[in-house]
Amino acid sequence: MTAEEMLLEPFGTVPDLVRARAEAAPGSIALIQGERSLTFGAFDALLDRVAASLQRDGVKARDTIAVCAGTSIEYVAAFFGALRAGVAVAPLAPSSTAESLGGMIADSGAKIFFVDKAAATEMADTPVSAPRVALDGSDVGQPFEAWLAPDGAKPEPVEIQPDWAFNIIYSSGTTGAPKGIVQSHRMRWSHVGRGGAGGYGPTSVTMVSTPLYSNTTLVSVIPAITGGGTAVLMEKFDVVKFLEQAQKYRATHAMLVPVQYRRLMEYPGFDDYDLSSFVMKFST
């Protein structure tokens, strides 16, 4: 079934749609981070390796993993690869207190904790029983590349059900302990189906400059990738770098919070950049 045919179905899954995009255009660029890029063919194969690794480690469908790290290709691969195994993802904010992070990891029941050095340093004294995988290859856990199953590894197929948890987004905890908000595969599929109305598709290029633990970001990243377009990942928002990359890659989409728009438009050199490729800019 082609991606376009899948999108006409009442229910499908994000990882299956990624596979359809990879089969249709394996050489198209799915992700860009700095000087690195990953084609859809390579991205799809990496998702298989992540899913196979989780299954090898005893993580079952409907279990959960937690991720607390900066934006990276590895982060996106761990997130989407877990989905392929039917595993829910709890993306956590590195800016949370160590106590809150420990509570969220425990509450989610995470079987594996994906982390990077910066996040691990902030929560150095927080006990975490789940095995750690270091997305940045640092010494804070088993390096991601070493943890991965070999090239060509394939996971056991999982028939994902509409009401299974896709992700758990935690509230900020301003009125008490952070609370987990469970969003289902059914909810995300309806979200994917609306992507075309927002202009997402194989020719779209989406700037990703808000953190991946935020639903704001996922609302943009998911249709960007499942639409067969390119997501340009920024590890940290920077006005000049955003404008440079938006111009370089002919960006069509961006999801930004109001203060980011203000900082961009107040930058004295704003008018020096060609941003005419943009089709849609979102805010929250």
Image (cartoon, helix red, strand yellow):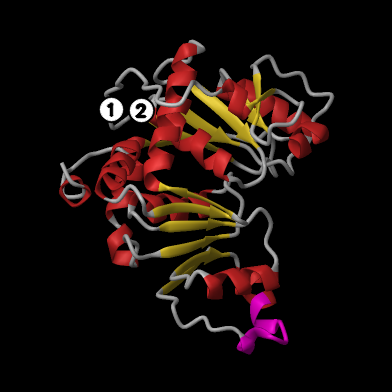
Quarter residue 23 falls in: top left
Question: In the picture shown, does residue 249 fall above or below 135?
Answer: below
Badge 2 density bin: few <14, some 14–19, many ≥20, Cα 10 Å: some
**Image side of residue 20 versus residue 178, left or right:** left
Circles 1, 2 touching at the beta carbon (< 8 Å) = yes
Quarter residue 9 falls in: top left
State which region is magenta.
264-272
Q: Quadrant of the N terminus?
A: top left
Quarter residue 44 falls in: top left
Kindly identify which residue carries mark 2.
164
Please indicate, yes or no, whether residue 276 appears anywhere in the rendered image.
yes
x 53%, y 55%: residue: 32
Residue 256 screen position, x and y as percent: 57, 65
Instruction: Tell me the SS state at disc 1.
Output: loop
Q: CA distance from mark 1 to mark 2?
A: 6 Å
Kindly identify which residue carries mark 1.
161
x 60%, y 33%: residue: 67
Q: Which secondary structure is most common in the magenta stretch?
A: helix
User: Can you tell which mark lies on residue 193?
Assistant: none
Task: Choose between 242 and 179: the one closer to the eye.
Answer: 242
Q: Label 1 is placed on what type of residue?
A: Gln
**Image side of residue 192 versus residue 232, left or right:** left
Task: Choose between 62 and 2: the one closer to the eye.
Answer: 2
Residue 79 screen position, x and y as percent: 50, 36
Task: Choose between 238 and 247: the one closer to the eye.
Answer: 247
Instruction: Tell me the SS state at disc 2.
Output: loop
Residue 221 screen position, x and y as percent: 46, 52
Question: In the picture shown, does residue 122 fall above or below 126?
Answer: below
Badge 1 density bin: few <14, some 14–19, many ≥20, Cα 10 Å: some
Please indicate, yes or no, whether residue 182 appears anywhere in the rendered image.
no
x 48%, y 70%: residue: 251
